[in-house]
Amino acid sequence: MGAKRLKAVVLDGKKRIGVHNRAEIKRLSQLCNKWVQFQPLFLPGSMAAYVGTLMRVLPTQMAMDGLLYKILLKKWGTGSMNQMSVEMGDSPIKNWKGSSEDWGITHSRSVNPDAIRKHEKVKYHCYACPLGCGGICAMQGKYGETHKPEYESVLALGGLLMNTDLESIFHLCEVLNRAGMDTISAGATVAFAIECYEAGILTKEDTDGLELTWGNSNAIIALIEKMVRREGIGDLLADGSKAAARKIGKNAGNYAMHAGGQELPMHDGRNDPGYGVHYAVEPAPGRHNVGAQMYYEMFQLWKVMKSLPRVKPLYFKGRKYVADEEKAAMAAACSKFMNVVNCAGLCMFGVFLGAKRIPAFDWLNAATGWHRPPEHYMEIGERIQTLKQAFNIRQGVDPRTFWPAGRVIGRPPQTKGANRGRSINMEKMISDYYTQFGWDPETGRPTEKTMARLGLGAGEDVV
Ligand code: SF4
């Protein structure tokens, strides 16, 4: 593509897109639907926080299974994890410097899954999806209703800012959706601004008179509305925390929690180092929708590809922090698999249910008429990943600049909370990941040999 200066391929036409074996796709879908439809009784949402507390205090970790996630997603949507995540140390608090000790159960109760579900007027789902994680919620104020806020939005506008005012979160989700702005980046940029204000780097004069303090929901609303209109301090912050830090100077960059300029989502690398690694190694940095150790557990790819590492149902938490070849193979498998999933137009939440329950590879074979093993599709995923990496490098983007902010990977480690004392051996985990793809372990550049192996040409014009 590079040599031909091709920017995009457009397919157009009026014919219905067909599949090779419609009956087989139907049969596979009915099998998986049957499993998804089964919904056992589960704890009330008010108990979710205590499940998180238990997960925090136990020295062992139970491998996450899609069965649990299915129950949660069907009942509450992604917000099912809100309080549980805060308690177990997955969700960052107070711009990544706090913990559930600062924003405990009494605070996070405001975003409990049942507290949100109480507002739900109607559930909705993508075409033919039996999970149906979406919903419309009633709210006060000028908009009257909004889409049920996702986990990421609630925590980015909640715990990250120490904000317990659920109405303000509903309102801001609607404001940001209407403006086409990302709730994660907006919340993270406000957290950055509050910490700058706390450190005296920004003053009331700079903030147009706003008292930017933790949990001040009125000020948070006013600030985000200013960002949407690019007005005053809002103009300074509208391009995100990295750009704002550069303009502000005075070491403001210390409070900007991003990877390669992308504000980070609500999953803490100190709790699951897989997140930290994927934030840094993905060609689009700071992504939470590609891989993590927990994602690998849920994908259960080893059940259909014997060469991949198996995960024990119960293991000591210390295992998560050991940088070894197994972790690198797990991380690489997540990246390859999610490339296949995204290209096939499948939903990540669906494949969380496990490779034996959601027959992604069998669906693809039925659609294409191929009889290829899962390994073949994983190689397609590998090729896509390498192509994306090579594209970045050709454009002069250095993958080593994608390191997430120090707090995210435990540098320095926290002294309290669920992630106390934890830090990640990022150097080794990143270079092991690059090695898995046949990229240079130091620079992350795909080697000529790898480019040739994947049929991406000798690569002279890229590498
Ligand atoms: S396809 Fe995915 S996003 Fe859409 S309703 Fe189903 S689970 Fe939710």
Image (spheres, rainbow, N blue to C red):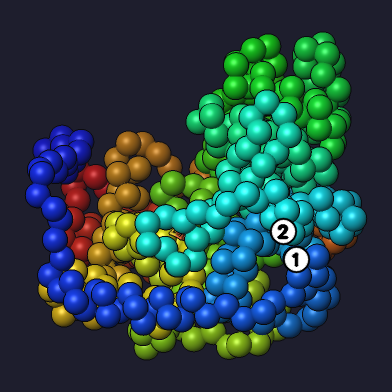
Left or right of residue 50: residue 246: left
- Residue 252 x %, y %: 72, 29
- Residue 242 x %, y %: 60, 31
Crowd tier of the residue under label 1, counting other residues whose Cα lies within 10 Å: few below 14, some 14–19, many 20 or above = many
Residue 6 lies, with reference to residue 361, above or below; the image says above
Residues at marks 1 and 2 touching, judged by CB atoms closer than 8 Å: yes
Q: Which residue is mark 1?
A: 45
Residue 452 lies, with reference to residue 361, above or below; the image says above
Residue depicted at 41% across the width and 49% down the height: 283
Q: Amino acid at mark 2?
A: Pro
Residue 80 location, quadrant: bottom right
Crowd tier of the residue under label 2, counting other residues whose Cα lies within 10 Å: few below 14, some 14–19, many 20 or above = many
Left or right of residue 396: residue 265: right
Residue 184 lies, with reference to residue 252, above or below; the image says below
Q: Which residue is mark 2?
A: 113
Q: Nearer the viewer, residue 6 or 412?
A: 6
Left or right of residue 193: residue 127: left
